[in-house]
Image: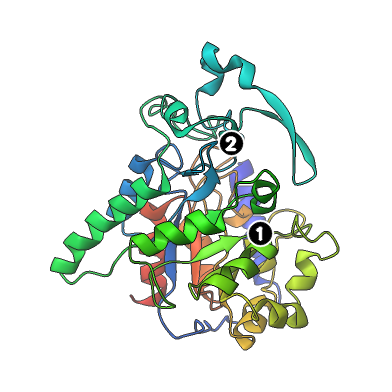
Amino acid sequence: MIRWTFALLALSLAGCGAEPVVAKSTLDGQPPIVIAHRGASGERPEHTLASYKLAIELGADFIEPDLVLTKDGVLVARHENEISETTDVADHPEFAGRKATKSIDGKDVTGWFTEDFTLAELKTLRAKERLPKLRSTDYDGQYEIPTFAEILDLLTEVNAKRAGGRGEPVGVYPETKHPGYFVSIGLPHEGPLLTILDKYGYRGRNAPVFIQSFEVANLKALRAKSDLPLIQLMDAQGGPADDPKTSYAAMASPDGLKAVAAYADGIGPSKDLVIPRSAIGTLGDPTSLVHDAHAAGLKVHPWTFRRENYFLPLGDKGGIDPAGHGDLAAEIDAYLKTGIDGLFSDNPREAVPAVHKGTGK
């Protein structure tokens, strides 16, 4: 009964004074892309080759590895440089002495950090589900931490096969995690990242790659060295860790977007900046962000679309169980109408057909 009461309330609110929504076009008129957020992370432990492989099989246009560095300067895929949430490091007595507390972007974080391990040591760990209360843990302990090179090897193999069948290449969408912090400890992202991308043939503005960051200086440094497409990430609150005087809200204003366009090719906003939610969790009216970004010549790739009820708007929930699955396609459809150029999703199984249906791709 609670579920239906909420659903009826959401429908009634959505209908009050609402006018038909006319779908807007993307910046370049091309269909929106589906970016597999940490791979198919709704079904496999995030940032594993298994997660990326499944995302590719499910039709994602890009796979997204978050990149941090090891003690010996190797780029590896982890959501954070602190790895206790995503690996079994706490179960390894030989690494108990590596536990530490560090200040990362102004916040104290306690755990185990990639920069304190060599690649060989990290390879002895195994990945685990980061959201065990919402998702299956059946695959915990099965997969290694992949290097960025191993991810690009996977894409090279996949795209070679696709080229024979004239299929579109699957792109890569790396994020530099805490780049200012890594610079401060002598492990900058830019050199290793650009070197390995060049080695694998990712060159020029038309390469199937986007490089993203929540920070600004990192992107400006990359722009000075490369013309690869860059994306400025924006959260719903706060601002860049490397520029405390600037807020993401200011960056998302028309003037702020013009400034971003001087060094980036697009923005990756929290989806709440595109369509905010009401106090009871229903989707509100779209903001002007997509229009304003397009006016500045920027693409818009909001994050993150997930199928669990815990993450969905009230009207799209499939029940009161937070781990249950709701109508992700309905949420995606609302965002497609704003003219977004792509979206990040943990669930390409649902997101890919939803985007194809919504755009006639």
Mark linked to residue 115? 2
Task: Identify the residue at the far left of this view.
Answer: 164
Q: Nearer the viewer, residue 93 or 116?
A: 116
Residue 18 in view, yes or no: no
Residue 197 in the image, given as x and y percentages of width and height: 41, 61
- Badge 1 marks a residue whose secondary structure is loop
| Residue type, label 2 | Glu
Residue 249 lies, with reference to residue 124, above or below; the image says: below
Residue 358 falls left or right of residue 297: left
| Residue 8 placement: quadrant | bottom right
Q: How many marks?
A: 2
Q: Quadrant of the C terminus?
A: bottom left
Residue 119 % position (x, y):
45, 34
Q: Give the residue drawn at x 41%, y 81%.
A: 30
The amino acid pointed to by label 1 is Phe
Q: Which mark is residue 238?
A: none
Q: Which residue is mark 1?
A: 214
Q: Residue at x 58, y 38 (%)?
A: 322
- Considering only vertical position in the picture, is 346 above or below 205? above
